[in-house]
Image: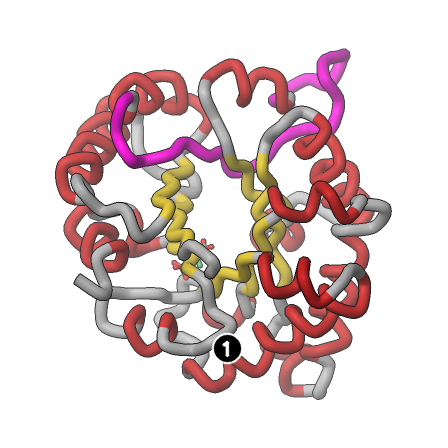
Amino acid sequence: MRKPIIAGNWKMFKTISEAKTLASEIVEGVKGVEGAEIVICPPFTALSEVSKVIKNSNVILGAQNMHWEKEGAYTGEISRNFLFDIGCQYVIIGHSERRQYFGETNKTCNLKVKSALEFGLKPILCVGETLAERESGKTFEIVENHLKGGLKEIPPEKMKCVVIAYEPVWAIGTGKTATPEQAEEVQKYIRKLVAEIYSEKIAEEIRIQYGGSVKPENIKDLMAQPDIDGALVGGASLKAETFVKIVRFNL
Ligand code: PEP
């Protein structure tokens, strides 16, 4: 039985004080929830303070990106060691905004996934097609490319720490959610690919989130799909009320 994982990606929003307020409202709102893993990914600057706010709660800390090296002359970068030190357990890798605006490639995603796993951080590897790619019938090809590229040389024993997020780029921040059937078609395909690359057992165990305009109004139908094991939530994770409703979708 896969435990659902609901993660909030706060992107480049929230000052430290705003982040502390939001985190404490979320902690309050999800008290007692045991059926899902709840992760919040504030910006780097707020990680340390948010880490203190969520201590001893059922909310877990994640980051939005990392560098693959432990340390070095990489001005402006943040290493996995720093994230671990601050209390992060998860790190989002290869978000489409990073692929689109910051030159993230399958190669860099793969280096980051490997590095995170080596250090005990759990990667949430994002995969997904743009609208143009979907309209030209390339959805499966792109998703396969992102998945195989990101997971290259990741050994089977590490796969229990990996989460995949299927995020169709056309549904991110646009208000256009993939229908549960559209999402399920690709989520199922991702699970089939994991079975081919690794094994049926690993495919059965791996958690695959859906991301793209997830809201309290659509989470239930999305989560009813057999291959959707949670959500990566952007906009709706910036307000405690909506994020808590998403986490509590089945209560
Ligand atoms: C995201 O940032 O990963 C995301 C899915 O954003 P939104 O929920 O706003 O579409």
Answer left or right for 96 relative to 214. right
Quadrant of picture, ligand 1: bottom left
| Residue 6 in the image: above or below residue 28 | below
Circle 1 — which element?
helix
Name the residue located 42 percent from the left edge and 52 percent from the top edge. 5
Answer left or right for 32 relative to 137. left
The spot of residue 154 in percent (x, y) is 79, 45
Find disc 1 in the rendering and name its residue: 183
Name the residue located 50 percent from the left edge and 77 percent from the top edge. 183
| Residue 32 in the image: above or below residue 243 | above
Q: Residues within 10 Å of mark 1 (few under 14, many from 20)?
A: many
The spot of residue 175 in percent (x, y) is 35, 71
Q: Is residue 68 within the magenta segment?
A: yes
Quadrant occupied by the C terminus: bottom left
Answer left or right for 205 relative to 8. right
Picture quadrant where residue 59 is located? top left
Q: Is residue 199 within the magenta segment?
A: no
The spot of residue 87 in percent (x, y) is 45, 21
The response on whether ligand 1 sits within 8 Å of label 1 is no
The spot of residue 133 in percent (x, y) is 68, 78
Amino acid type at mark 1: Ala
Name the residue located 72 percent from the left edge and 28 percent from the top edge. 118
Name the colouring of the figure: secondary structure
Name the residue located 36 percent from the left edge and 76 percent from the top edge. 224
Magenta stretch: dominant SS?
A: loop
Picture quadrant where residue 80 is located? top right
Q: Which residues are magenta?
A: 56-78
